[in-house]
Image: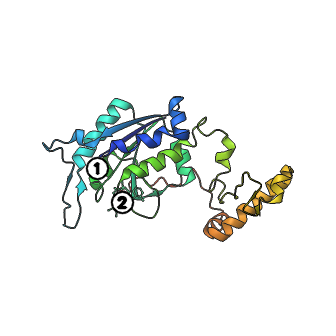
Amino acid sequence: MHIHILGLFPDTFDTYFSQSLLGKARAKGLVTFHYHQLRDWSHNKHHAVDDKPYGGGSGMVIMADVVCAAVLALKKDHQISRVVLPSPAGSPLIPAVAQRLSCEDSLLFVCGRYEGVDQRAIDKVVDEEISIGDYVISGGELAACVITDAVCRYIPGIVGKADSVENDSYQQGLLEHPHYTRPEIFEGVPVPQVLINGNHAEIKKWRKNESIKRTLERRPDLIDRIKGAKPMSNNQGTTKKANNNG
Ligand code: SAM
């Protein structure tokens, strides 16, 4: 998997992508990261990439011509298979979306800033918009990191044991059970007895029950989703250009 990130702050990523699982995956050649400075495609003598919004209002908007020129050039040079714009207006980042994207050969993330990107560029060169949650952050860089991390967990060989991804929260529609490690008693609180008796059938049952209990307490909406038998299909969340299809 080749990850390309286009934005105004390409230096943001390297520390994160050099650590832990992604750092190891990178060292093994399972994933490569490439950063591209959007200003390199500005025709403006000051390398400006943004301008005031038509219709007035606060903030600046990233210009369509710069984004289109950058994406088309990167597609030509790097055989990008999917262009993703992190956006609060995108489809929610759910496991099925991350899993689907993990099957791509190469992704290009276009990182917005300010008020966002001119809609005409989105309509022209972006394949898909993805939101990392119902809140607004200051730029697409952090969102691209979050999406990349979630996607890479599905690439075979990146997470040590495949079953740890399969048992993760949301994967089966539930939150994961709580975890414990040594010491057996911490400040007077013991580890649940069932986890130290070595009975794997009992442990499995306990974990399932805890997972359901925790989901009911914290995210009853997930239980409703399971009851409604609305499976997370691979097609879910493929909102392309939200306002393109009417
Ligand atoms: N004015 C925009 C709005 O209200 O929808 C927010 C723009 S935000 C300050 C700048 C950039 O951060 C966006 O273009 C997008 O790339 C990124 N961003 C912000 N929140 C995000 C989220 N929840 N998910 C994904 N990307 C986000």
Residue displayed at 24% across by 56% down:
61
Q: Name the residue under label 1.
A: 121
The 10 Å Cα crowd at callout 1, few under 14, some 14 to 19, many 20 or more, is some
Is 63 left, or right, of 181 in this rendering? Answer: left
Check contact, mark 1 vs mark 2: CB within 8 A: no
Left or right of 235, for residue 131: left
Hey, what amino acid is under mark 1? Ala
Q: Position of residue 88 (x, y in %)?
A: 40, 60
Give the image's coloring scheme.
Answer: rainbow
Q: Where is residue 89 in the image (x, y as percent from the top left)?
A: 40, 60
**Rendered image: mark on residue 243:** 2
Q: Which of 203 and 110 is in front in this view?
A: 203
Tell whether 10 sits left or right of 29.
Answer: left
Identify which amino acid the numbered label 2 is placed on.
Asn
Q: Residue 139 carries which label?
A: none
Which one is in front, 125 or 221?
221
The answer to whether the beta carbon of the residue marked 2 is less than 8 Å from any atom of ligand 1 is: no
Is residue 144 depicted above or below 187 in this figure?
Answer: above
Count of number-bearing discs: 2
Ligand 1 positioned in quadrant: bottom left
Q: What residue sits 43% from the left and 41% below the top?
A: 15
